[in-house]
């Protein structure tokens, strides 16, 4: 009976956040550059993100990490295949706090 109550509570929590819009970001990598390096950039320049090819990208919702994935092509578009999602209860708690 306790599992049913926990499931009902979880469903209620989801219902309160179902209609929130969020920004999903898949971060390929980042690097710090000097302005003089930026000024030298031109068409065809390559910026090394210092991340090995094939390594997971981090997935963020509203600048909070929620998981990892891999870049792929889907219907001629870039896409992310999710490999790992952080604890869903933590994600729900985060968005519930956003409502307050």
Image (tube, grey):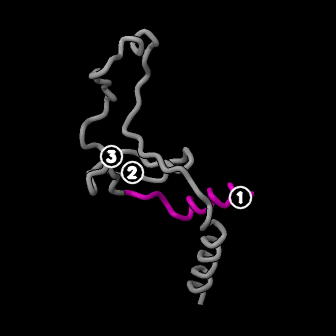
Q: Are marks 2 and 3 in contact (CB under 8 Å)?
A: yes
Q: Where residue 32 sits: x, y (%)?
A: 44, 22
Q: Are marks 1 and 3 in contact (CB under 8 Å)?
A: no
Farthest residue toward the bottom?
1
Determine which residue is flagged by label 3.
Answer: 56
Determine which residue is flagged by label 1.
Answer: 99
Which is nearer the eye, 88 or 18? 18
Q: Where residue 60 sits: x, y (%)?
A: 49, 48
Residue 73 among those drawn in magenta:
no
Q: Residues within 10 Å of mark 3 (few under 14, many from 20)?
A: many
Quadrant of the drawing holding the C terminus:
bottom right
Q: CA distance from mark 1 to mark 3?
A: 31 Å
- What range of the chain is rendered magenta? 84-100
Q: Are marks 1 and 2 in contact (CB under 8 Å)?
A: no
Residue displayed at 41% across by 41% down: 27
Q: Residues within 10 Å of mark 1 (few under 14, many from 20)?
A: few
Residue displayed at 35% across by 16% down: 41
Instruction: Tell me: 45 left or right of 14.
Output: left
Q: Where residue 44 sits: x, y (%)?
A: 27, 22
Determine which residue is flagged by label 2.
Answer: 68
Quadrant of the drawing holding the N terminus:
bottom right
From the image, give the main secondary structure of the stretch colored magenta. helix
Quadrant of residue 96 within the rendered picture: bottom right
Residue 88 among those drawn in magenta:
yes
């Amino acid at each position: 009976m306790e599992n049913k109550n926990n499931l009902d509570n979880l469903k209620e929590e989801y219902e309160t956040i179902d209609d929130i819009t969020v920004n999903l970001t898949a971060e390929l990598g980042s690097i710090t550059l000097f302005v003089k390096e930026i000024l030298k950039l031109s068409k065809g320049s390559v910026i090394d993100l210092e991340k090995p090819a094939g390594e997971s990208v981090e997935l963020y919702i509203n600048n909070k990490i929620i998981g990892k994935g891999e870049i792929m092509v889907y219907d001629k578009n870039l896409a992310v295949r999710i490999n790992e999602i952080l604890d869903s209860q933590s994600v729900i708690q985060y968005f519930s706090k956003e409502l307050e």
